[in-house]
């Protein structure tokens, strides 16, 4: 097959073109291409079936590995990453709420202090 530069993503466009070996080389012909081919289905750039079909034609063993990869990435890793971001957002909101409560207590204490000062200044006979 014709060697395409890694920056040219057009070789993913026609998945069905070429023989089975050409499809394998187009999608998995080196570490950078393999990484891109595995990354694209996760991000929606390629269908899972298009990326797995050439591998499935080689052996059932590779189908099991592909399903394990899909399961790990889709359910495991991506959900953990989303959980980390959601936890960070919740902590940020709680921190803001705690700071607002401290500001309100400080404002209330300042108001009480001013009122106390006014009453003490207006008490002429110290009663």
Image: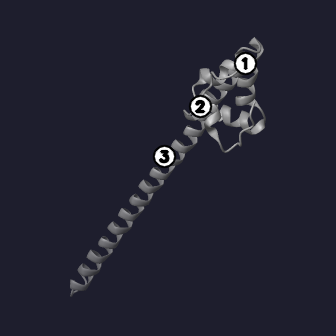
Quote the CA–CA distance across marks 3 and 2: 41 Å
User: Which residue appears farthest toward the top when viewing the image?
Assistant: 60
Q: Nearer the viewer, mark 1 or mark 3?
A: 1
Q: Is residue 42 above or below residue 57?
A: below
The numbered mark, 3 or 2, whose residue comes first in the sequence reads: 2
Local secondary structure at mark 2: loop
Question: Where, quadrant-wise, is the C terminus in this rendering?
Answer: bottom left
Residue 35 got which mark?
A: none
Of residues 53 and 125, the one drawn nearer to the viewer in this rendering: 53
Quote the CA–CA distance across marks 2 and 1: 16 Å
Q: Is residue 85 above or below residue 101?
A: above
Which image quadrant for residue 51?
top right
Residue 13 got which mark?
A: 2
- Disc 3 designates what residue? 90
Question: Where, quadrant-wise, is the N terminus in this rendering?
Answer: top right
- Disc 1 designates what residue? 20
């Amino acid at each position: 097959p014709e060697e395409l530069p890694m920056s040219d993503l057009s070789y993913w466009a026609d998945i069905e073109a070429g023989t089975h070996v050409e499809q394998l080389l187009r999608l998995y012909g080196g570490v950078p291409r393999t990484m891109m081919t595995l990354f694209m289905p996760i991000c929606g750039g390629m269908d899972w079936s298009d990326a797995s079909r050439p591998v499935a034609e080689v052996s059932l063993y590779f189908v099991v590995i592909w399903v394990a990869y899909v399961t790990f990435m889709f359910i495991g890793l991506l959900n953990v990453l989303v959980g980390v971001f959601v936890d960070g957002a919740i902590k940020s909101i709680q921190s803001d709420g705690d700071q607002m409560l401290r500001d309100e207590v400080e404002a209330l204490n300042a108001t009480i202090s001013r009122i106390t000062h006014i009453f003490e200044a207006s008490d002429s006979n110290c009663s």
